[in-house]
Amino acid sequence: MPELPEVETLSAILAERAAGREIARVLPVAVSVLKTYDPPLSALEGRTVTAASRHGKFLDLATDGPHLVVHLAKAGWLRWRDGLPEAPPRPGKGPLALRLLLAGPERSGFDLTEAGTRKGLAVYVVRDPQEVPGIARLGPDPLDDAFTLEAFAGLLRGVRHRIKGVLRDQSVIAGIGNAYSDEILHAARMSPYRLASDLTEEEIAGVYEAMGATLRSAVERSRGLAATDLKGEKRGGMRVHGRAGQPCPVCGDTVREVSFRDSSLQYCPTCQTGGKPLADRRLSRLLK
């Protein structure tokens, strides 16, 4: 799933290539991705793109009229294209969900695509991004200057949930998902199962510092890359996430995994759990 660093870079790509240009056509291919109807999708046509930005994991393409807001979900992606074909795309079984064409002879714009059968890609046309329910309930952005250590500590106070889940909760902190929460906790040398309310001041400071360093490093590594290269950069920059069975780059221990119904987490026992493997409940059920 694209998270804060990737969405930040995609917004920068749109800001550089689309700002100041007129939208010629918006062509829905998978109608199910459109989650709003007023204003209609056609209200974007003839409008000039004024900016592109990010709200957590949401992309926001602003015009001199409505906003086009996109949540890429688990398998969605944005592909910038020059020389888009003149024939309109046909609905079918392919990954293409929506095409936006900018005015001009170069026929540039972008495609929104989604792989797999579990569809979650969502597109909104709104007058204000706060009309999107997912944006309205977002917590603070971890890269915002106002997100201080004191603010972070206040969010954790009295929260009796595992720190892994807290970091992923978009209503608590915006933009962090499964991958970067694994990386943050590895950098902080903390078990993903620790209760947020049990953390000491020193441990909270450690998670806060790891959060900022991990996300800023990922944003910096992605800066200037083409959209097609972002996924590879994300995978290549991971130290534990997606690397179960491989050696930890810090201590050499084997990276372990805990599987859930629709996701998994990865961690290093030596770095994070005092050398003790965490219980994998799904595996335990299979062994019974």
Image (cartoon, rainbow, N blue to C red):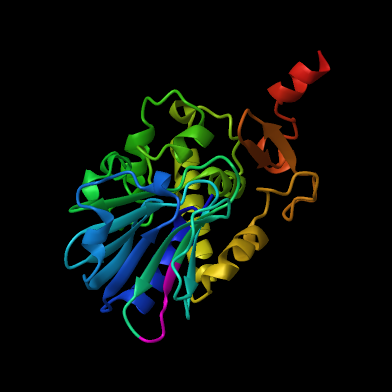
Give the camera-side residue of 210 and 22: 22
- Establish if 186 lies above or below 193: below
* Residue 32, image x, y percentages: 41, 44
Residue furthest toward the top?
Answer: 288
Q: Is residue 270 left or right of residue 190?
A: right
Q: Is residue 178 left or right of residue 259?
A: left
* Residue 154, image x, y percentages: 32, 36
Residue 227 within the magenta-colored segment of the rendering: no
How many numbered discs sit on the rendered protein? 0
Give the camera-side residue of 239 and 92: 92
- Establish if 215 lies above or below 16: above
Give the camera-side residue of 240 and 57: 57
* Residue 71, image x, y percentages: 41, 50
Tell me which residue sits at (46%, 47%) in the image.
176
Q: Which residues are magenta?
A: 105-110
- Establish if 114 lies above or below 217: above
Tell me which residue sits at (71%, 37%) in the image.
257
Residue 147: in sight, yes or no?
no
Residue 272: in sight, yes or no?
yes
* Residue 156, image x, y percentages: 39, 33
Q: Main secondary structure of the magenta part?
A: loop
Give the camera-side residue of 183 and 189: 183
Q: Quadrant of the C terminus?
A: top right
Tell me which residue sits at (26%, 71%) in the image.
49
Q: Is residue 288 left or right of residue 197?
A: right
Residue 108 within the magenta-colored segment of the rendering: yes
